[in-house]
Amino acid sequence: MKNIFKHITLVLLAGFSFLACETTELDLTVSPNELSPTQSDPNLLLNAIQLAYASNQYVLSEQVGELTRIEYFGNRDYFAGLPGSTLNAVWARVYSSDFTVPGNGAVDVGILTNLQALEAIDAETDVDYSFHIALGKIMYAHSLFQLVDVLGEAVFSQAGNPAEFPAPLLDSGEDVYAGAFGLLTEAQTLLAAAPGTQGATDMFYGGDTEKWIKVINSIRLRSYKNTGNTAAFNAIVNAGNYITSADDDFQFGYGVSELQPSDRHPLYETSYTPTGVGPYRSNWLMDLMLQNDDPRIRYYFYRQADGTPGAIDVSGNPVPPNEETISCSLFTPPAHYAGFVYCSVDNGYWGRSHGNDEGGPPDGFLKTAPGVYPTAGRFDDSQFNSVDQITGVNIAPGVGLGQGGGGAGITPIILSSYVDFWIGEMATSDADKATALRDGLEKSIAKVQAFGALDGSADLSVAPTDTEVTSYIDDIVAAYEAASGDDKENIYAEQYFTTLYGGAFESYNYYRKTGFPTTVFPNWEPDPGAFPRTYLLPQNEVLNNPNLSQKADLSTQVFWDTNPAGPTFPPAN
């Protein structure tokens, strides 16, 4: 087991540091000095599949979350901010990568090639590797759904067959969706026999095949939701065999090792450093949660400062503008930002608004850090950092190595709270949607609050009480029931997006399907270009595949996106 864990840790480093290591084509040549795939350890192959998949889930959540304002997007122009390289690594990890597991050069950190190797091994041996293959098919299927959601199309029918298709063609979104549904059916058939793990490390459910079948049905739910297949969606819900509780939540967990290779949450690694916080938090989400008095805010965000220049501090006093740390605190907001937080959020929530492309000032020990959920950072108990406001020099660290939960957080993939919001999205009555809203909030807040225990230094006496949580949920549901039109839809969408923090992928689908919430902050630039309906094709694949041509813009719509073309939709953009 120690040796297996060593390999897992090594691959984890590969999976999350692979953002700059892109493949050049789907087919890769294996050195004659290396083992052939069928001579590889099947358990290592499954490890590589799981880690490639987990890495993609984190990266995709962050990328699409920037567009939906759950995360911060730092470009005034959408096209410039989403170049063809954006999905290079994601594409590579789905199909094949050129980063191999140390000590076993035939095992690459990818999904399809390792799945094919597992199938070949299974065909040549008396050992039953159905468990391995089933998990590979599940993760490959979900990845294909997601590639269609972000690109509009993907390689499927000609994928993984370089001898016959050295330059594979793209299949339509409809065809790839159909193929992915087929893979899920194949995986379920394999798992129905309760196959043994053969010593494999299941990084998600410890070999529990029943939970994996719930994952299969939950992936079906999200895909039927996207395509509007109400009958198929309701059939799964009525059968009840999907992710319904936190015990079933589909998530990837991290460790606390600071040594290389590190196994901590990727966002923790870039935020709890000796030089302070790296990425900014989204002003839209922080302001929304602050205005709502959302009980999750102290878990999502850790404030290092008690006030942000140009805003009001925690004591209700104005904080003077500061050109060095937040230059926009001196600006007059442009007309299109009227009614929105252009620069600074009150109460020390130090982030950036959508499209802010200013440079990086000395604010590493001032800006808000990701909190204890889901990153396993610090719980915000109002123990603010002490920083010289003139020099920006840190006096009493707010963030640093090992702070809070040490990075042993999660990447949420499909949580029971997410599924409740999907049920509400597909509901045909306001009463059913209100019930789903309540269920989703109850499960989300309970899960988030449980993470407070990860920060052993936190003063949890300032955490919201059960009474406050109940009151919050009651008030949100009552406001939803009393509202009408766009106001009603905005309440639901805002709570859904808040719940998706850390696992934001489905927010992109919801936003393109419904156009809500319309309350999201606009881009800093009055004319940033139409909202991206899909991304550009991965440039590495375009350059090396003569059958592909790069898109001219970001306007291509996914087959299930039947809304008007941009720039009139989504309306907030």
Image (cartoon, grey):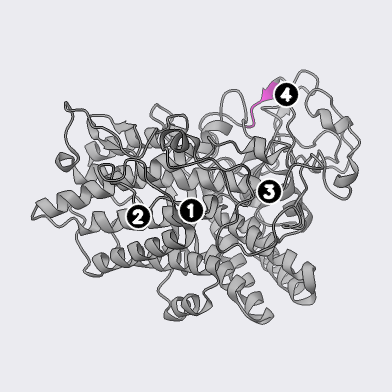
Left or right relative to 372: residue 307: right
Q: Is residue 193 visible?
A: yes
Q: CA distance from mark 3 to mark 2?
A: 35 Å
Q: Residue at x 41, y 65 (%)?
A: 178
Asked if residue 396 is among those painted magenta in the image, a careful observer would answer yes
Identify the residue under disc 4: 361
Identify the residue under disc 2: 157
Q: Tell me which label, 2 or 4, sits earlier in the chain.
A: 2
Which of discs 4 and 3 lies nearer the camera? The answer is 3
Q: Residue at x 45, y 45 (%)?
A: 56
Q: Tell me which label, 3 or 1, sits earlier in the chain.
A: 3
Identify the residue under disc 1: 153
Residue nearer the viewer, 10 or 404: 10
Classify residue 82 by image quadrant.
top right
What amino acid is at disc 1? Answer: Glu
Q: CA distance from mark 4 to mark 3?
A: 22 Å
What amino acid is at disc 3? Answer: Arg
Label 2: few (<14), some (14–19) or many (≥20) C-alpha neighbours in 10 Å: some
Identify the residue under disc 3: 69
Q: Residue at x 56, y 58 (%)?
A: 558
Residue nearer the viewer, 353 or 288: 353
What amino acid is at disc 4? Answer: Pro
Label 3: few (<14), some (14–19) or many (≥20) C-alpha neighbours in 10 Å: many
32 relative to 477, above or below = above
Residue nearer the viewer, 180 or 217: 180
